[in-house]
Image (tube, rainbow, N blue to C red):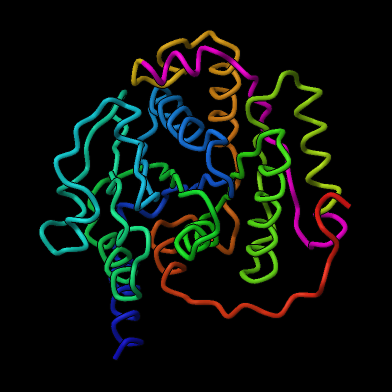
Amino acid sequence: MIENAMYDQASGLRRMTKLSSTKVITVTGGKGGVGKTNVTLSMAISMAREGKRVMVLDADLGLANVDVMLGLRAGRNLSHVLAGQCDLQDIIVEGPYGVKIIPAASGTQNMAELTAAQHMGLIRAFSSLEDDIDVLLVDTAAGISDMVLSFARAAQDVLVVVCDEPTSITDAYALIKILSREYDVQRFKIVANMVRSYREGRELFAKLTRVTERFLNANLELVACVPLDDRVRQSVKRQKIVVDAFPRSPAALALTSLASKAMTWPVPSSAGGHLEFFVEKLLVKQTPEPTPNEAPIGE
């Protein structure tokens, strides 16, 4: 019964020809407070300014903040979709430059811990999506929950945001390790965020690659070094995004450059370049394999 339902959903999604060219990028990081949401929204706004049709999914299902950061009032969110009160299309709100936002619930424990049926319901909701979009950016929760791993392994590109702090590096490594060993995700794009110089960003990347090259079969690519910039904090207080509030600030320029670069990333042949493939991969529960012992990240 479940297999038939999954097949029906996948078949229906394959008929969604309007969404066949959507690029899907998951932005994650392991640790909270590393600036994932700011990176996500900065990329979204930068892409939209260039004429791209962009949608942002707030996948922090228990502590949503995408709409808050943009100063938007979302009357309904994903909790209402999962409760069967409305369709996914009904909760979408429009942000700056026409960016479409799928808001999640905030402060709702049961949204952070979805049952298998709710997880399937969330996936099914995507089949009702009618928007013709070029890019779907998924802003995940902190940590390595099943939902974070699901969204990361299903995307075409996984963007890992890291700060130059031991806990951030350790948590990013843990996330990469699980995705690499248990879900066969082998390519990760790294954003060194809130660094004091490009050199510091390169050194941060080197710390991460030293341990991944030793213990993992994963390919890491440094795609941006975003400088520590007080204009980011000022923007947050204004409920605006730095690329919009202070477009010539150092952080904004780095994030705008990242967005431009992201649009040139090739779509892996295994992903097919389709939003429906993203959703179909969310349907597949992969079985983790046992992993060998390894030294702590600092060794």
Q: Residue at x 48, y 11 (%)?
A: 247
Compared to 285, does 72 lie above or below? above
Residue 281 in the figure: left or right of residue 222: left
Q: Position of residue 256 (x, y in %)?
A: 54, 22
Compared to 138, does 4 lie above or below? below
Number of numbered discs on residues: 0
Image: magenta residue range? 212-237
Q: Which quadrant does the N terminus fall into?
A: bottom left
Q: Position of residue 208 (x, y in %)?
A: 78, 45
- The one nearer the camera, 110 or 262, is 110
Q: Position of residue 61 (x, y in %)?
A: 35, 53
Q: Residue at x 29, y 79 (%)?
A: 8
Q: Residue at x 67, y 41 (%)?
A: 190
Residue 103 in the figure: left or right of residue 223: left
> In this view, which residue lies farthest toward the bottom?
1
- The one nearer the camera, 20 or 200, is 200
> In this view, which residue lies farthest toward the left?
85
Residue 162 in the figure: left or right of residue 282: right
224 in the magenta segment:
yes
Residue 91 in the figure: left or right of residue 70: left
- The one nearer the camera, 129 or 88, is 88
- The one nearer the camera, 177 or 260, is 177
Q: Residue at x 55, y 77 (%)?
A: 286
Compared to 38, does 89 lie above or below? below
Q: Please identify the quarter of the rendering in which residue 240 is found.
A: top left
Compared to 126, does 141 lie above or below? above
Q: Please identify the quarter of the rendering in which residue 206 is found.
A: top right
31 in the magenta segment:
no
